[in-house]
């Protein structure tokens, strides 16, 4: 699993994730999301375009980070999950709790 972060104006960070978010990789994923929030950027786009699979621990990391964002007045949104990931989000009903966007522009616009 690889990460790349893009920082936009207005405290918006986009975390681009690549690979599978499973098992031990989930802890790294969670820490990377936390790092973005700890540096004062309270608006986070998690780009799942290149993530082929996630497990329940990855979902837990997303929910924990979402709650933290909400408590601190920020926001977390997901960007373009692949079909398998989208299905997991729908089956677990996380797709009803978190905003999911098809384009990066739409995801960034969610913060205005």
Image (spheres, helix red, strand yellow):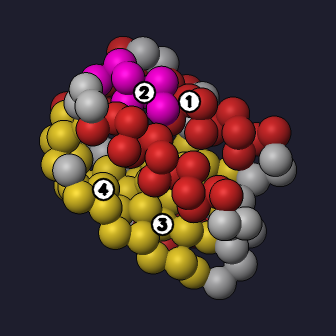
Distance CA(mark 1)–CA(mark 2): 6 Å
Point 48% across, 46% down: residue? 31
Which SS does the magenta portion mostly show?
A: helix
Which of the 4 quarters of the picture holds residue 4? Answer: bottom left
Q: Residues within 10 Å of mark 3 (few under 14, many from 20)?
A: many
| Count of number-bearing discs | 4
Find disc 4 in the rendering and name its residue: 17
Of 21 and 38, which appears nearest the observer?
38
Q: Are marks 3 and 1 in contact (CB under 8 Å)?
A: no
Find disc 3 in the rendering and name its residue: 14
Q: Which residues are magenta?
A: 55-61
Point 42% across, 15% down: residue? 92
Find disc 2 in the rendering and name its residue: 59
Q: Is residue 86 above or below residue 50?
A: above
Q: Considering only order in the chain, which callout, 4 or 1, is on the residue closer to the N terminus? A: 4
Q: Are marks 1 and 2 in contact (CB under 8 Å)?
A: yes
Q: Residues within 10 Å of mark 4 (few under 14, many from 20)?
A: many
Of 83 and 74, which appears nearest the observer?
74
Q: Are marks 3 and 4 in contact (CB under 8 Å)?
A: no
Q: Residues within 10 Å of mark 2 (few under 14, many from 20)?
A: some
Q: Is residue 7 visible?
A: yes
Residue 63 numbered tag: 1
Residue 52: x and y, percent? 16, 41
Viewport quadrant of the C terminus: bottom right
Distance CA(mark 1)–CA(mark 4): 17 Å
Which of the 4 quarters of the picture holds residue 111? Answer: bottom right
Distance CA(mark 3)–CA(mark 4): 9 Å
């Amino acid at each position: 699993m690889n990460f790349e972060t893009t920082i936009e104006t207005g405290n918006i960070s986009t975390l681009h994730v690549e690979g599978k978010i499973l098992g031990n990789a989930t802890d790294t994923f969670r820490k990377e999301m936390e790092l973005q929030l700890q540096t004062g950027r309270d608006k986070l786009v998690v780009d799942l375009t290149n993530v082929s699979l996630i497990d329940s621990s990855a979902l837990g990391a997303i929910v924990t980070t979402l709650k933290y964002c909400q408590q601190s007045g920020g926001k977390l949104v997901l960007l373009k999950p692949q079909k398998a990931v989208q299905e997991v989000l729908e089956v677990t009903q996380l797709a009803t709790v978190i905003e999911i966007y098809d384009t990066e522009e739409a995801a960034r616009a969610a913060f205005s």
